[in-house]
Image (spheres, rainbow, N blue to C red):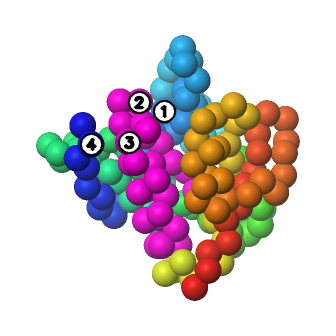
Amino acid sequence: MTTYSLRPAAPADGAFLADMVVEVANWRQGAARPRHDVLADPVSRGYVAGWQRPADRGVVALDGDGDPVGAAWYRLFPADRRAHGFVASGVPELIIGVRPLWRAQGVGRALLQELAHAARSSGHARLALSVEHGNFAAALYRSEGFAVVETSGRRDTMVRTLLA
């Protein structure tokens, strides 16, 4: 199960990215919020609605059969329609999801690194994300240079500076 490849996300990946938003919402063991409940939330829906806008970038991980197993992407949000990890207009917010069987195998790290490279290449100086307290992915984010800049309720907003 450790063989995977990466490719840029395309407009046709919108439904899979929505699947990954559901994975993110259900990261806790035993969590089972139905897809329609997760995507009914305006913030969750905002991560995928109208994919792929001109400033959107993403990466999809594929297993050896070419089936998608994870994705990381970023979007820019205006101040009046903030997502969970909003820090400022012009700072893209990263969303990342990996199917449970593929977690802890390097897929998330590869997606994160590739997306950070894409953001840097697109001229962005920072990337932001939001992670719930207790989510094991926070350790990955810290190891990739993200630092907590704000805590709100059960969530931390983390930012990574992208060096040239």
Q: Pinpoint residue 13: horizontal percent, then vertical percent.
A: 34, 51
Give the Cα distance between marks 2 and 4.
Answer: 13 Å
Tag in front: 2 or 1: 2
Give the Cα distance between marks 1 and 3.
Answer: 17 Å
Indicate the quadrant containing the C terminus: top left, top right, bottom left or bottom right.
bottom right
* Amino acid type, mark 1: Glu
The residue sitting at 22% across, 47% down in the picture is: 3
Front-lying residue, 55 or 20:
20
Residues at marks 4 and 3 touching, judged by CB atoms closer than 8 Å: yes
Residue designated by label 3: 105
* Amino acid type, mark 3: Gln
* Amino acid type, mark 4: Thr
Sooner in the amino-acid sequence: mark 3 or mark 2 = 2
Residue designated by label 2: 100
Sooner in the amino-acid sequence: mark 1 or mark 4 = 4
* Amino acid type, mark 2: Pro
Q: Pinpoint residue 38: horizontal percent, then vertical percent.
A: 57, 29
Which range of residues does the magenta coloring cover? Answer: 94-119
Residues at marks 2 and 1 touching, judged by CB atoms closer than 8 Å: yes
Residue designated by label 4: 2
Tag in front: 2 or 4: 4
Residue designated by label 1: 23
Residue 36 in sight: no
Sooner in the amino-acid sequence: mark 2 or mark 4 = 4
